[in-house]
Structures are given as C-alpha cells and as structure tokens.
Image: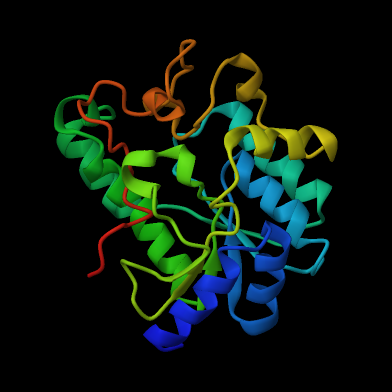
Amino acid sequence: MKKDEIEDVKKELDKKEPQEIIKYALSNYKKIAIAFSGAEDVALIDLATKVDKDVKVFTLDTGRLNPETYDFIDRVRDSYSLNLETYSPDTEAVQKLVNAKGLFSFYQDGHKECCGIRKVEPLKRALSKLDAWITGQRKDSNPSTRNALPAIQRDPGRRELIKFNPMANWTLNQIWGYIMENRVPHNKLHDMGYVSIGCAPCTRPILPGQHEREGRWWWESGDKRECGLHLTEYK
C-alpha cells in the first residue's frame, strides 16, 4: 500500500469503531496477526474472533513474566481455542547478558538493553512472517508517545509492514467496560493494583492519581516509558 493510499484509508478508519477496523484488516491482509500481552489485546481478540474465529495471535514470553501472567496467557488460549504462537528470546543472547551483568542490570543500566534481547528481537522474528499486524495500543496509554496514534499506519520501525491500532481511540475505561460486559478474561494482577503489566522485575502497582505507565520502569526518569516494541519515529 502506497503512502497516499494509507492516508486515504486512515481518514476513513480513524472514524470507525474497533470491530470495523479489525474487519477491514482481516479482509485485506492474509499474513496478519494480533500481538497479545495485555487487557487491550484480549478485548481485541474477543472482537476479532467474532469476525474470524481462526485469527492468528502471537505473544512474547520474555522469561521474566509474573506467574499470574503465564496463567492469564493459558486462560486466553483456552477461552478462544487459539493456536497461539509464543516467541521467546534467544538463549545465547540472554546467557551472554546475564553472565556479563547479572539478572538485574536494568536497574543500573536502564531497561533498553534487556528489552532489546527479551522483547524486540523476538518481535522481529514474529513479524518476519507477516505483511501486517494488529496491536491493542491506545492513545491515552502513553500520551507523550502515542497521542497521535492512527488506526492504520506504515510501521515506523519496519516500513514494509502495515500496522493496525483498532483501540487507538478507546480509553482505559472503555476497555474495562468491554471486558466486564463481555466477561473477557483478564490478568489477576489487575485485581492487585497493576494497570500496565510487563516483566515482573520492571512492573509494580500504581498509586491513586498515578498514570498507568508510572508502574513501568519506575526507577528511570522521564515520562516516555517504552520498551522498543512500538516505535514512533520512522527509520
């Protein structure tokens, strides 16, 4: 799809509800999959399976997730009878990092190196098989980096890929309204005060009044808390 074509489609899809965006994505791309990790993604899966019960879904297992998250992944797999593809980090790369710097180097060096090995590289492998992917990103999940998030875009980090963000205009409250109304499975950590959930050592519950991303990489300064999976600048 050419740049001007994407802009034309974007103008239309930005006005649409998530299920209409999903239907367009699944109708126009065969090599397409949903990236699954959090609450938004399960609402996305619930909507997508109403369009195509055999929709492809993948997840990233960093090796550092909470037990509740692993339980959540299995419940989602079983609830929707998914053929869920799981991508793990390269063993040699993990061993090299841990042998050189230990298990918690990110507290001193920042999270980018560890996320690069445990998340970004496995995502690259997952996306290598696809022409397009669908994410659960929302504008309000990180206003400093996602405020202009469109319903469709050429992936900023992987220009050959088309990226769909059907939940872009939904708020966190809308996501949870859908989850509760439709009895969609959710991570039990949410019941313990966690909102944005990543790896166990890098995620904690938030306090009243804090933004959801303040529970991620809290020891680092700045408000642009991203792991590198979703790039905002074109390369």
Q: Residue at x 27, y 32 (%)?
A: 223
Instruction: Reply above or below: 22 against 171.
Output: below
Q: Is residue 40 found left or right of 216 in the rendered image? A: right
Q: Is residue 98 found left or right of 35 in the rendered image? A: left
Residue 165 location in percent, x, y? 53, 59
Instruction: Reply above or below: 198 against 193.
Output: below
Question: For residue 125, what is the image quadrant?
Answer: bottom left
Residue 119 location in percent, x, y? 38, 50
* Residue 20 visible (yes or no): yes
Q: Residue at x 66, y 39 (%)?
A: 175
- Given residues 3 and 133, the one toward you in this image is 3
- The number of numbered discs placed on residues in the rendered structure image is 0
Q: Is residue 121 found left or right of 58 in the rendered image? A: left
Instruction: Reply above or below: 175 against 137.
Output: above
Question: For residue 232, what is the image quadrant?
Answer: bottom left
Q: Residue at x 59, y 74 (%)?
A: 32
Find the residue positioned furthest to the top. Answer: 208
Q: Is residue 187 found left or right of 229 in the rendered image? A: right
Rendering colour mode: rainbow
Residue 2 location in percent, x, y? 41, 89
Q: For the C terminus, which image quadrant? A: bottom left
* Residue 90 visible (yes or no): no
Q: Residue at x 32, y 40 (%)?
A: 144
Residue 180 location in percent, x, y? 79, 32
